[in-house]
Image (cartoon, rainbow, N blue to C red):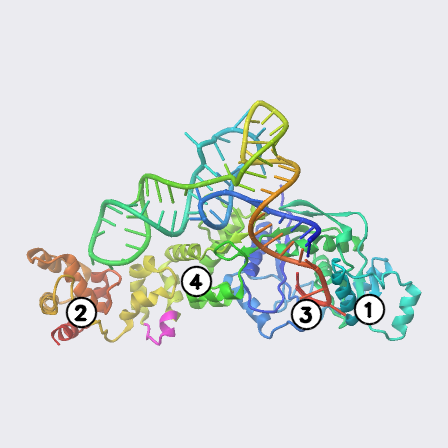
Amino acid sequence: MTIKPARTRIAPSPTGHMHLGTARTALYDYLLAKKTGGQFILRIEDTDLKRTVPGAEQEIMDGLRWLGLNYDEGPDVGGKFGPYRQTERREIYAQHAKVLVEKGHAYPCFCTPDTLEKTKQEQMKRKENPHYDGTCRVLSPDEAARKIANGEAYIVRFKMPQEGVTVAHDHLRGDISTENKQFNDQVLLKTDGLPTYHLAAMVDDHEMGITHVLRGSEWLGTFPLHVNIVRAFGWHEPIWVHLSVFLKPTGKGKMSKREAADAMKDGYSIFIKDMPALGFTPEGSLNWMALMGWGVAEDDVMSMEEMIERFSVDGLTPSPAAINFQRLDHFNSTHIRLMNADDLASRIKPYFERENLKVDDAILLKMIPLIRERLVTLDDCLAFGSFFFKENVTPLPEDLIAKGLDSKQSAEIAIKSYEILSALSEINHIVAEPPMRAYVEQSALSANQVFGILRAAVTGQKVSPPLFESMEIIGREKVLQRLKNAIEILQR
RNA sequence: GCCCCCAUCGUCUAGUGGCCCAGGACGCAUCCCUUUCAAGGAUAAAACCGGGAUUCGAAUUCCCGUGGGGGCACCA
């Protein structure tokens, strides 16, 4: 059986930071397109001029590229169905609105915002649901034409059926029926000549040949409206897939600004732009977000290729998912461990440079096996490997004192260690460990005590990668110098 | 207030009438390994929201509650 290539799209509006929800939808869009040999498209829905924020569009494009979700068509890459920015498609919407008016499915409305607001207030006073009162719906075409000729400002409204039921089919939820009287005659074209989402998205999805519309469940409320618009045009519908929303980690309510700030304090973020600086990898992030709303029974650690291989729209879940940042840590560290040394080296290098450390590439490559399984986020490389690139380290005096010993006894151990190590012509883990172990054996000390002092002296910290392997990378000269320095600190 | 959607371990989920005294993963706990921290190995605790109905048999179908979420703009 051959699968029909799917054309999918992510259609964000440039009104703020690109967040997790957008990224996940884009991921599913991408997976579906790639799996079926189709195309994934970026379309910018910038019809609300008041809410558009400068730079937001760029942030979306950067975010998608960072994730590796490269789109086949979009504002900055072009494509046969462009333009891909809705403000540049104004004429297309005007024409389509006109078609709808001519077909009797839409009508010009001359009501001013003021009178609209007034009727709304009155309706609320009467405890009615606020709705458009239909004043202009009943205007004769002649009358409307006269008003337009007179230069009266107008908008275009969709003529929603007032009776009956609309049955809309969602791929994950089945048929959703809603009584038509629940709906307003929604605005299709605004006074500024730009369309609302309802018109623009329907027109573009059709014109761009979109086969599957994946979007957030916040669109479920206007879903019947959209279906009516598409049907009014006489077009066939795409496959509709309404995705679940993300809830805050407690599972109660969705992420708010407040929760986003709290997450940031813990080193997490729901904004894609923050992910690199926090040390998250595209692989880990993608794997994590993929699994919030997509049920994979087993072997849930997946590369992009594996996700494409295994993806199916039918596997998506309709229920809301609480964000779990611990799982992000898990997927991130797992993918880090899966990377080869060269790859990981190039990824952690910027974090050292961010701290103004001069990175020696040979050392960088050598330390990878030592720190790889210790990294949860990429920036953890700082905690585990900064000392490799420092000229000298300054251990805390208390870190140099072994458990159960005083500074004098610790100094003696450091001196003895110095004697043992300086007797070697080279320090590597093969030649350095046996004599040190022998020393531990014949003394009344524990390995923990001796190696603890050595670790603090050489790395400047209590927690580090394996000691002897680390000393090997640091080199004999520096190791001895740091040890000498530690002895001085202890004797002070 | 009205409308729509959702409901399995703390969390993400598998499960589409018998294979389920419910499987996996995160997290948690214990043990092993161990010079620190990790990683790895082993083990454990942990769920079908409630009530009806259909059926020989229901986590799985239907109804009613309850809880949660979303929507009711010349915003998307």
Q: Amino acid at mark 1?
A: Cys
Viewer-nearest residue: A215 or A84: A215
Identity of the residue drawn at 73% across and 55% down: A226
Q: Which residue is mark 2?
A: A476
Residue A89, given in percent of the width and then of the height, sits at 72, 68
Q: Is residue B44 above or below residue A259?
A: above
The answer to whether dots 3 and 2 both sit on one chain is yes
Viewer-nearest residue: A187 or A84: A187
The answer to whether dots 4 and 2 both sit on one chain is yes
Residue A349, given in percent of the width and then of the height, sits at 37, 69
The chain to which mark 1 is attached is A
Residue A356 within the magenta-colored segment of the rendering: yes
Asked which quadrant contains residue A402, the reply is bottom left
The number of numbered badges drawn on the structure is 4
Q: Earlier in the sequence, mark 1 or mark 4?
A: 1
Q: Which residues are magenta?
A: A351-359
Q: Earlier in the sequence, mark 4 or mark 2?
A: 4
Q: Earlier in the sequence, mark 2 or mark 1?
A: 1
Q: Secondary structure at mark 1?
A: loop
The chain to which mark 4 is attached is A
Q: Which residue is mark 3?
A: A48
Q: Which residue is mark 4?
A: A280
User: How many residues crowd around disc 2 within 10 Å: few (fewer than 14), some, or many (20 or more)?
Assistant: some
- Residue A435 visible, this orientation: yes
Q: Secondary structure at mark 4?
A: loop
What is the distance, in whole Å, between disc 1 and disc 3 at their CAs?
20 Å
What is the distance, in whole Å, between disc 3 and disc 2 at their CAs?
65 Å
User: How many residues crowd around disc 4 within 10 Å: few (fewer than 14), some, or many (20 or more)?
Assistant: many
